[in-house]
Image (cartoon, rainbow, N blue to C red):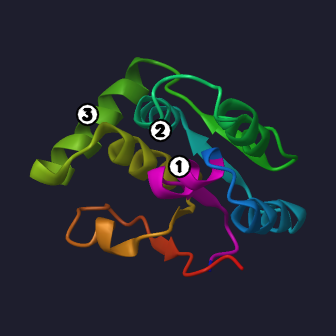
Amino acid sequence: MTETGYVLDATVVSEIARGDLPLIAMLFGLDGRGLPLVVPALVVASVAAEMGGGDESGFLPAVRGIARLEHGAYGGLGDFDDALELGRVAARLGDKQRWEDAHTVMLARLWQADILTLDAARWDGQELDGARVSEIADPE
């Protein structure tokens, strides 16, 4: 695992939203070590849609809580140049492109952080333009 920080991909954010306590505890531990944890906006949107769009599952407080940790951050699209860069990354991802993944890669490059995932295979064969992937096998 890296010492520069992490951008959380959809697999991690989805499990946080479902209340995976060992994973949440692990993220609190990383924050305690001073490592940035970035929650991408398009990943939040994707997981919210996957969960039916509502917050009745505890989704918003759990994911929002990670972004509000001392070293947590919400990775949004700040301006026109961010949108252009997102499009460039999406184009490089090609036919496997998902907007939430493109945003994850874009933020990993911007923050010089690893992509944190529960499924490294989902990133195999993708053009990550130097971004690295760190897999959590079992946070327990």
Q: Residue at x 31, y 74 (%)?
A: 121
Quadrant containing the N terminus is: bottom right
User: Residue extending furthest left?
Assistant: 95
Q: Position of residue 60 (x, y in %)?
A: 68, 31
| Closer to the eye: label 2 or 3 | 2
The answer to which of marks 2 and 3 sits earlier in the sequence is 2
Q: CA distance from mark 1 to mark 2?
A: 6 Å
Instruction: Give the SS element for disc 3.
Output: helix
Q: Amino acid at mark 2?
A: Val
Q: Earlier in the sequence, mark 1 or mark 2?
A: 1
Task: Determine which residue is flagged by label 2.
Answer: 47
Q: Nearer the viewer, residue 97 or 89?
A: 97
Q: Are marks 1 and 2 in contact (CB under 8 Å)?
A: yes
**Kind of residue sitting beneath label 1:** Ser
Q: Residue at x 74, y 68 (%)?
A: 22
As helix, strand or loop, the secondary structure at mark 2 comes to helix
Q: Identify residue for label 3.
A: 87
Query: Label 1, on which residue?
Result: 14
Q: Residue furthest front?
A: 56
The residue lying furthest to the top in this view is 80
Q: Which residues are magenta?
A: 2-16
Residue at 49%, 69% (x, y): give it: 118
Residue 58 point in image, percent of width and height: 70, 35
Disc 1 secondary structure class? helix
